[in-house]
Structure formats: structure tokens, C-alpha cells
Image (spheres, helix red, strand yellow):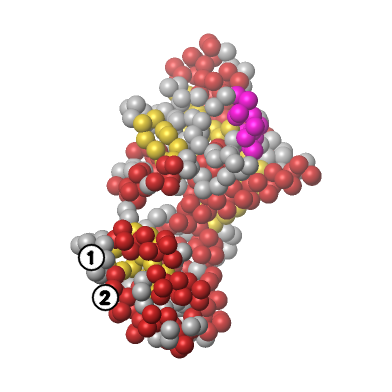
Amino acid sequence: MSQQEVQSLPLAGIRVVEFVHMVMGPTCGLLLADLGAEVIKVEPVPEGDNTRRLMGSGAGYWMTYNRNKKSFAVDIKSEEGMVAVKKLLATADVVTENFRPGAMEKLGLGYEQVKAIKPDIIYSSMKGFLPGPYEKRTALDEVVQMMTGLAYMTGPVGRPLRAGASVNDVMGGMFSTVSILAALLQRKETGRGQFVQTGLFENSAFLVAQHMMQKVVTGKAAAPMPSRISAWAIYDVFETAQEGEQVFMGVVSDSQWVSFCETFDFPELGNDAGLRRNNQRVSARDRIIPLVRERLSGMDKQTVMALCEKAGLPFSPIQRPEDMFEDEHLNQSGGLAELTLPDGEQVKVPMLPLEMNGQRFGARLNVPKLGSHSRELLAQLGYDDDQIIQLESTGAIKTA
């Protein structure tokens, strides 16, 4: 991307300094970076962000949430390192952090301390809980899913199950981005910065609000998803003729019901006056579903999906995350950004799920090596070559 193209991005000219790890904080920075902000990731020397070395279910975090960022590797516990960090903060528009409560204040980098350096700073703190009785607790995505009933809604009765992605961490980073953008807009009018905060627990409570309101409206508690009473008669995963191949299909309106009956050749259902309205069909679900399952079990998956598309029905094959690398729509619509791994391997990763004026927001910078931008940033802050070499020799900073 040319310098002119970079300068045309929505957040061009905004400098963000992030003190983050894992998923929630890095997601916030990723959104801001993809939209054009200069996001500088402050990492501890000598090994950098611990997220770089996670394995198992965390092995994909680093590569997913850290593109388009610069790495500034510094020992903030050293006097020289802290001086450099404070000089960097004096140039920032936004600071983000998602460490345990009190950690940034202990380092001397809490909101009031940073505000003394840059009075109009926007400081985003991402925590497990917003201020209240729980605010000192340690939280993880899985913890708050258990606390709010999200895990209860996901698993079968008696077997709470966390969602299959870091939904609260990712959405928490998204809400943090929203608050930062709102604060930037206010600062443009008032000239004042502010402290903004988001919480994983509150995020998860927001996600289950529809189930809370279901109890209010119906008087009955929402059942977990595996045993829920669907709002529609057909809204299920169906087996096809090919072993192990399944298709999800829904019929969610009266007009779709007519189209479904015509396309899948169910005249006896389509002509039944007692099935013309949605709630009538829900009441007759025990009659309808066995007929549909029997019919679809004799068809191959491709035929079922072709008929669903013809009928205008919502449908999907049952896929795995790795199938997305070859997804026709993602590839042909430009929905995958190309990245180069440290070992030189070329990979693809989903872009932000949005478009502005026909523009998608991809990768300008590969995921950074530790300290890959330390020298560049120090030079911007007024350090000469000899000073940078001296800082590096003492271990106060690391350059790639």
C-alpha cells in the first residue's frame, strides 16, 4: 500500500500505544490498526509478549490479532526504558491496556499518570469487570461465560459449554474500539481526552440479554440451545445420503414455507391450511420434522444445498474453521488478507467484516518481530544512533 493510500485510511494520523496481551486488548488494537491508525505494541524485553509463545488453543492468537502493528521492545522497569516510553506516550492519541487491575498504576502508567504526560490522552482500560463488587477478580472469557449463563445456554442441560471461539474477548475489544472512536469524536469538539473502560463480564451479560428478556416476555426461562424450543418448525441440522455429510436448513417465514414445500416436493404440507402460519407449524413440528429428515436423508449434500438456494432458504454445510481457507466467497470477494509468517510462509487470514466506500481493510504490515520498529520509533523521538546503540547495549531496548 502506498503512503498516499495509507494516509487516506479512516484513522490515518492517529497514534495508539498499546500495553496488551492475549485477545481482548490485541483485538482492539487490530481494529484500530486495520482502519489506519499507527498502533505501537509495547513489549517487554528480552522475550516480548507471552502471547507469542502460547501453544494449544492459544497458538493462533498472536498471528490473528497483531497484524498492522509496530513492535517497540523495551524494559520499562529500567530508568532509561521508562524515559523512552514516556517520550512515546507524549506523542500518542490513545493508550490501551488489558492487564490485571492495578498493574499499570504500579508501573507508573495508569490513566492519571499518563494524563500528566499527555493531558488530552484517550486511555482505554479493558478488564474482567467494570467497577463494582467483582472488579478485583481475575476473569477469562470462559469464566464470564459460566457466570452469565452463556455457557449454560450453549451446552446440553447439566453440561455447560463455552462457545467455540473467544466471543467475549473479541467483542470486548470491539466495544473498546467503539468507545475509543466515540472519545476521539468528543475530543475533536471539546479538546479533552478521557478514560474509557470495558468489561468481559458485562460483555457476556449483554450477549445473554435476549435470553433474560425471553423470561420476562414468556414467563418461562430460556432452555439451553441443544434443548430449546425453536421459533420455527424447520431450523435444524439434517443428515444427507453421504455418510457424515450434514446441512443446516431453516424455514423462517410463511413465504419461505411455500417455497420450501414447492421446491422439495411436499404438496401434502403446502396444501395443508393448518400449516400456513408459522406458529401453526411450530405446534406441528413433531409431524413435520420426521418427514423432512426422511426426504433429505435420500439426497446428497450438493442437491440439498442447490434446492435450498433455489428456494431462497437459509442453509449451510457443516464446516470446520480450516475449511474457511478455501471458502469460495471469502476468496473471491477479497475477504482474506495475506500475511507472511516469520519463517517466510504465506498465509491468509480473515479481514475485518466491513467495507467503507467499497474499500476492505487488509494487511499493510506483517505481524511484527520483537522490536522490529524500536529503532525507527526511537529515532522519531529524537534519539541518535549512538544513544540507540547505548540503550540496546544496556538491555533497555531491543531492536529486530
Number of numbered discs on residues: 2
Quadrant of residue 36 within the rendered picture: top right
Question: Against 58, is 279 above or below?
Answer: below
Question: Against 334, is 220 above or below?
Answer: below
- Residue shown at 44%/17% (left/top)? 393
User: Dot 1: within a 10 Å radius of its alpha carbon, few (fewer than 14), some, or many (20 or more) residues?
Assistant: some
Distance from Cα at disc 2 to Cα at disc 1: 10 Å
In the image, the segment drawn in magenta is 3-18
Q: Position of residue 261 (x, y in %)?
A: 40, 75
Q: Are marks 2 and 1 in contact (CB under 8 Å)?
A: no
Q: Which residue is mark 2?
A: 294
Amino acid under disc 2 = Glu
* Left or right for 194, reference 271: right
Q: Position of residue 240 (x, y in %)?
A: 26, 65
Q: Position of residue 351 (x, y in %)?
A: 48, 42
Q: Residue 334 versus residue 137: which sits nearer the camera?
A: 334
Q: Position of residue 337 (x, y in %)?
A: 45, 37
**Residue 241 image label:** 1
Quadrant of residue 64 within the rendered picture: top left
- Residue shown at 61%/43% (left/top)? 356
Q: Residue 249 versus residue 60: which sits nearer the camera?
A: 249
